[in-house]
Image (cartoon, rainbow, N blue to C red):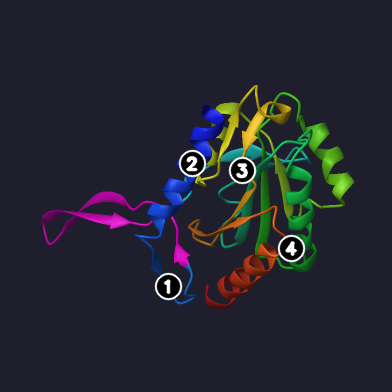
C-alpha cells in the first residue's frame, strides 16, 4: 500500500503547487506550500505568508566533509535521493545528472547534493567508491550520508519520495525526481531524472537562475 500511496501523494502535492505558484525575474515558479508567519507592523500583529525555504541541514559527503546550509549559500544546486545498490532507476538518473555535472562543474556557484537513503550500506567509503565510478568530484557533487531520520525528513522538504519498502526492488521505494534549488534555498523546478530530454529543460532553467539571481 505504501508503495502506491506515497508516489500518488507526491503527485497530488505537485498538482496543488500549480495553483499557488509565484515568480520572480527569472520567470520560474517558487514551488512549495506557503508558510504562515506572525510579524509586527506599526505596532500591530499581522499574519503573512512566505515561500517554502529548505531548512538547515547537516550531512557528511564522500570525502568525510560536512555539508550543510553554508555549503550551498549563494549557489544554485540540484537535489536527488538514491542508493548505490539501486537495481532500477538510480543508474539512469545518475547518468543523466552526469551530463549536467559535466556542463556546469566549472562554475563556483553550482552544486549537486545526492542523498543516500540506505545509510547502513552506503558508508563514506562506499560513497567514495561510487564517486570514483562516475568520475565526479566533491568540489561540485556531494554524495551524502548521515542520520537516517534526518535524510528521510529532508526528502519531504524537497517533496521527493523516499522510503523503505521491503516489497520494492532493493528494499527502497523512491522517486527519480531532481529538485532545482535557487541561491535562497527555494525550490524552482522538479524534473524527471530518468528522462534525458528533461535534462535540457533543467539546464535551461538553471541558466535563467544564473542570469537573474
Label 2 and label 1: CA atoms lie apart by 29 Å
Task: Report which residue position mark 2 lands on.
Answer: 8
Magenta stretch prevailing secondary structure: strand
Q: Position of residue 191 (x, y in %)?
A: 60, 57
Which label number is shown at residue 100? Answer: 4
Which label number is shown at residue 70? Answer: none
Question: Please, what secondary structure does the residue beneath circle 4 have?
Answer: helix
Give yes or no for contact between labels 4 and 2 (Cβ–Cβ under 8 Å): no
Task: Report which residue position mark 1 lands on.
Answer: 24
| Viewer-side residue, 95 vs 132 | 95
Q: What segment is highlighted magenta in the picture? A: 29-51
180 lies above or below 59:
below
Residue 126, quarter of the rendered image:
top right
Does the magenta run of residues contain 47? yes
Task: State which tag comes first along the sequence, 2 or 3.
Answer: 2
- What residue is rendered at 76% in x and 35% in y? 86
Task: Report which residue position mark 3 lands on.
Answer: 175
- What residue is rendered at 55% in x and 44% in y? 160
Task: State which tag comes first along the sequence, 4 or 1.
Answer: 1
Amino acid at each position: 500500500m505504501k508503495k502506491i500511496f506515497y508516489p500518488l501523494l507526491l503527485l497530488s502535492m505537485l498538482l496543488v503547487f500549480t495553483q499557488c505558484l509565484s515568480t520572480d525575474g527569472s520567470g520560474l515558479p517558487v514551488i512549495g506550500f506557503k508558510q504562515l508567519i506572525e510579524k509586527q507592523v506599526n505596532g500591530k500583529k499581522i499574519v503573512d505568508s512566505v515561500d517554502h525555504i529548505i531548512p538547515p541541514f547537516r550531512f557528511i559527503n564522500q570525502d568525510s566533509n560536512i555539508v550543510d546550509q553554508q555549503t550551498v549559500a549563494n549557489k544554485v544546486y540540484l537535489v536527488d535521493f538514491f542508493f548505490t545498490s539501486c537495481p532500477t532507476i538510480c543508474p539512469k538518473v545518475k547518468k543523466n545528472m552526469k551530463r549536467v555535472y559535466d556542463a556546469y562543474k566549472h562554475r563556483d556557484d553550482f552544486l549537486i547534493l545526492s542523498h543516500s537513503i540506505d545509510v547502513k550500506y552506503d558508508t563514506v567509503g562506499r560513497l567514495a567508491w561510487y564517486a570514483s565510478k562516475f568520475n565526479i568530484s566533491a568540489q561540485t557533487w556531494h554524495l551524502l550520508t548521515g542520520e537516517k531520520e534526518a535524510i528521510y525528513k529532508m526528502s519531504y522538504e524537497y517533496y521527493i519520495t523516499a522510503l523503505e519498502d521491503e516489497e520494492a526492488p532493493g528494499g527502497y521505494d523512491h522517486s527519480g525526481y531532481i529538485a532545482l534549488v535557487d541561491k535562497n534555498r527555494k525550490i524552482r523546478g522538479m524534473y524527471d531524472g530518468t528522462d534525458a530530454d528533461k535534462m535540457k529543460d533543467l539546464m535551461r532553467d538553471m541558466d535563467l537562475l544564473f542570469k537573474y539571481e
